[in-house]
Amino acid sequence: MEGELKAKVLLVDDEADFLATLAERLETRGLKVNTAGSGEDAVAMVESEGFDLVILDLAMPGIDGLETLKRIKAQQPDVEIIMLTGQGSIRTGIEAMKLGAEDFLQKPVNISELMDKISEAKDKRMLIFQSKSVKEIEKILHTKGW
């Protein structure tokens, strides 16, 4: 199943070694991965490019993960976001989910678990697009009187 995931992913973390290692591990599993070392860079990249999924660290200097999540969701509401943290609390996880995060995982991340979460996020995104497509077709049919 992992080889079937052809998602475009933005990986955001201020730890350069972690970022490079995880990006490489995801790319070997068939994902197209872009990286950003800060929330500010991530927001700018989302503004200029479309992503299927953002994997976002919670604790970063500058704008933190929750603020980055808010800004990304404001620009691209349908993008799926998985939060990663080495120091998260249940309350922070709940806050991230309220703001639109798909899931919340602890570091060090288990790659199999992350791939499962990516697959779930892809499935959810596909259902959203299918639903929107059906609504658009119904709208066209209704306005054309067919």
Image (cartoon, grey):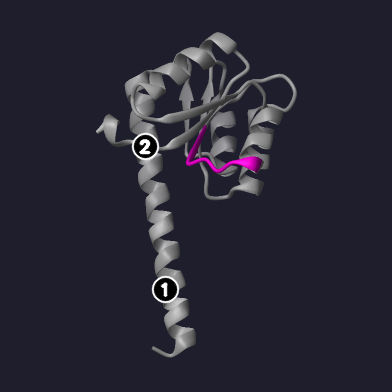
Q: Which residue corresponds to the image point at 44% horizontal and 70% vertical from the top-left?
A: 135
Report helix, strand or loop for mark 2. loop
Residue 133 lies in the magenta-colored region:
no
Would you identify the image quadrant in which residue 138 lies? bottom left
19 left or right, relative to 75: left
Residue to which mark 1 is pinned = 137
Q: Which residue corresponds to the image point at 41% horizontal and 37% vertical from the top-left?
A: 7
Residue 50 lies in the magenta-colored region:
yes
- Residue 144 percent location from the top left of the image: 46, 87
Q: Which image quarter is the N terminus in?
A: top left
In the rendered structure, are the residues bearing label 2 and label 1 in contact, judged by CB atoms less than 8 Å apart?
no
54 left or right, relative to 45: left
Residue to which mark 2 is pinned = 6
Range of the magenta residues? 48-54
Q: Earlier in the sequence, mark 2 or mark 1?
A: 2
Report helix, strand or loop for mark 1. helix
Specify few, some or many for label 1: CA neighbours under 10 Å numbering under 14, 14-19, or 20 or more: few
Specify few, some or many for label 2: CA neighbours under 10 Å numbering under 14, 14-19, or 20 or more: some
- Residue furthest to the top in view is 17
- Residue furthest to the bottom in view is 145
- Residue 140 percent location from the top left of the image: 46, 79
- Residue 94 percent location from the top left of the image: 55, 36
The amino acid marked with disc number 1 is Ile
Q: Which residue corresponds to the image point at 36% horizontal and 40% vertical from the top-left?
A: 120
The number of numbered badges drawn on the structure is 2
Q: Nearer the viewer, residue 32 or 64?
A: 32
- Residue 16 percent location from the top left of the image: 58, 12
